[in-house]
Every structure is written in C-alpha cells, then in structure tokens.
Image (spheres, helix red, strand yellow):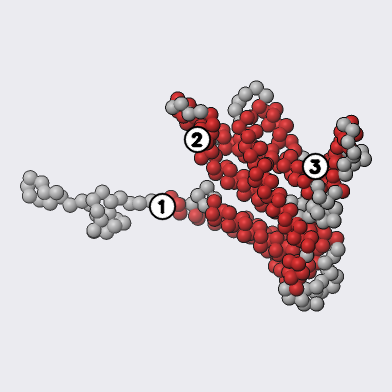
Amino acid sequence: MVDAAGTIDRPAASPLAGNDAPPGARRRSFPRYRNVGTAWPVLVLFLPPALLLFTLFVILPMGEAGWYSLFDWSGYGAPEKFVGLRNFELLLRNGAFQTALTNNGLIILVSLLLQLPLALWLATLVAHRIPGATAFRLVFFLPYVLADVAAGLIWRFIYDGDYGLVASLASLMGFATPYVLADRDYAIYAVLAVVVWKYFGFHMMLFIAGLQSIDKSLHEAAELDGASPAKRFRHVTLPLLAPTIRLSVFFSVIGSLQLFDMIMPLTGGGPSNSTQTMVTFLYTYGVTRMKVGFGSAIGVVLFLICVTVAFGYRRMFMRHD
C-alpha cells in the first residue's frame, strides 16, 4: 500500500515462505507430527511382540496349509508324496463339499432375508425408552450370549424324536413323532432355525445402537411435515441407519461362512453330510479322517473365499463408513 508520504508499506516476510510470502503469511505448525517422537518407544515396545504372535499363529499356519495342500499326507512324518493340485481337483468333484457350499449359501440367504429383517423389526420396537424395553432386549440377546456348543446341545435335545420337546408336542397333538435331525431332507432347515434364533440378538443390538444415534429432531420435523410412520422409517430411519445395516450384513456373511461350533454338537454334519458347512467339512476330512493334505486344500479354498468376500464387500459397500 502507498501511504500519504508516498512510501510503500511492504508486509513483513514470513520466515517460512521467504521474501515472496503473501501478505499475512504466518508460521505453520504441524500437529500431526508433534507426538511422533513420543510414539516411537511405544511402537518399539509393543509392536514386535504383536507381530511375532501374528506371524507364529496366523502367517505361518496359513503358509503351511498352502504347502501341505500340495501333498497326499496323513499327518505322520514328513510330507513326501507330492500331488500338486490333485487335492483341489478332488475337492471340487466331491459331492459333500458341493453340499457344504450350498448349505453355506443357504445360511447366508436366510441370514440376510430373515434374520436381519427380524432383528431390525425387533430393534425398532425396543429401541425407545418404554416400560419393559430393557427386559425385552435382555431376553432377545440371551441366545447370543449362550455358547455355540451349549446351544447346539440344547437344540439337539429339543429336536430329539424320543425324549425331546418336539416329540412331546407331537404326541400331545396326536402326530407321528418326527426325527428331524435324522431326516436328510429336513435337517438343514432345523439348523437354519437354530441359526436365526442364535444370532439375531447380536444384530438387534447393533440396530438399537444405530437407532439411538439418530437425532430425534429429524423424526419430529418429518412428523410435523405430515410424514406417516412408514414414510419416516423409509426416508429418515433407513438412510441414517445404512452404515449399521452394511456392518451387520458384513458380520452376517462372514459368520455364515465360518459356522462350525453349533453344527458339530447339533448334527455333526449329518445325516449323510446333509448339514455340512465348509468348516465342518474341513474338520471331518482334515482332522477326524487324518487327510491333512486334503483338509489343507479345503482350508485354502475357505480362506480365499472369506478374503475375497471380506475385502470385496468392504471395497464396494463400506468404503466411506
């Protein structure tokens, strides 16, 4: 600027920008790097043990499974009979493995189309602070707290055709006693019912947390505008609950692919492999029958499916969450 005396008032140069700094330039601070020096001791102290444990119990077993899948090996001695990709070829031709894949897909389908909508509906009923809501949440969440093995044993007794609850109800109503878990056509549907009962409480709690985080003023504004409850749910609740729904779908799909603990005490994969999943199939052939090479091939396929689904889903649907 030029003052009344004709002199030019130049701005003071910034010590960071040099002589060509724009007016008002100030020294900038970098808070992101301010605590790097104090973080290094923590990283040096805690990171190596974590990496060591992760390498010993995750990376090395995965590598060994990939290596053993190339051998016809029973688990005794060193693997010597190299068969290449023969185990994978036998796996893809195995009818029981195809049944296991189909059952995993059926579990995912039932989880997405029945379990999650049921959990969302119950969450909308008990999310608000009404009398008895806490008790209802506890009752619905209790099946998830119960251990998977215990749940499988309980439902095995309930389905028992001689002494179970189903047999007692059938005899009271004058029907023939059904042996649900012994029927290969209906056993998988009995398993699906237990899966829905066991895990919908977990998703219900996720939805309750998501519903309680929605600002109530948005619903009040929509109500003042004359929106019906159905329209408020469709245009206000669902869009704001979308991140929670995507997270719930992710947990449901990954959990369905890894289902194991509940099926083993319930059916053991039977009858005639009709209730096998990929993990129970791996246990049956890789552990109990000591076909370690074949079981390792199953583990590799299961790992590739889970990794592909997990990273693909996160890449497509959870990128901005």
Tell me which amino acid carries mark 2. Answer: Val
Tell me which amino acid carries mark 3. Answer: Ala
Who's the residue at 80% across and 77% down the image?
A: 81
* Disc ID at residue 97: none
Residue placed most toward the observer, 48 or 202: 202
Give the percent coordinates (x, y) of residue 12: 22, 52
* Drawn side of residue 188 relative to residue 207, left or right: right
Residue placed most toward the observer, 306 or 60: 306
Say above or below: 312 vs 147.
Answer: below
Tell me which amino acid carries mark 1. Answer: Phe
* Tag 1 secondary structure: loop
Give the percent coordinates (x, y) of residue 235: 49, 36
**What residue would you read off at disc 1?**
30
* Tag 3 secondary structure: helix
Who's the residue at 54% across and 42% down the image?
A: 242
**What residue would you read off at disc 3?**
151
Toward which corner of the image does residue 77 lie, by quadrant? bottom right
Say above or below: 88 vs 141.
Answer: below
* Drawn side of residue 18 relative to residue 257, left or right: left
CA gap between label 2 and label 3 equals: 37 Å
CA gap between label 3 and label 1 equals: 54 Å
Q: Mark 2 vs mark 3: which is more N-terminal? A: 3
Asked whether the residues under the numbered discs 1 and 2 touch, taking CB atoms below 8 Å apart as contact, a structural biologist would say no
Q: Between tags 1 and 2, which lies in front?
A: 2
Residue placed most toward the observer, 90 or 311: 90
Q: Between tags 2 and 3, which lies in front?
A: 2
Give the percent coordinates (x, y) of residue 202: 67, 40
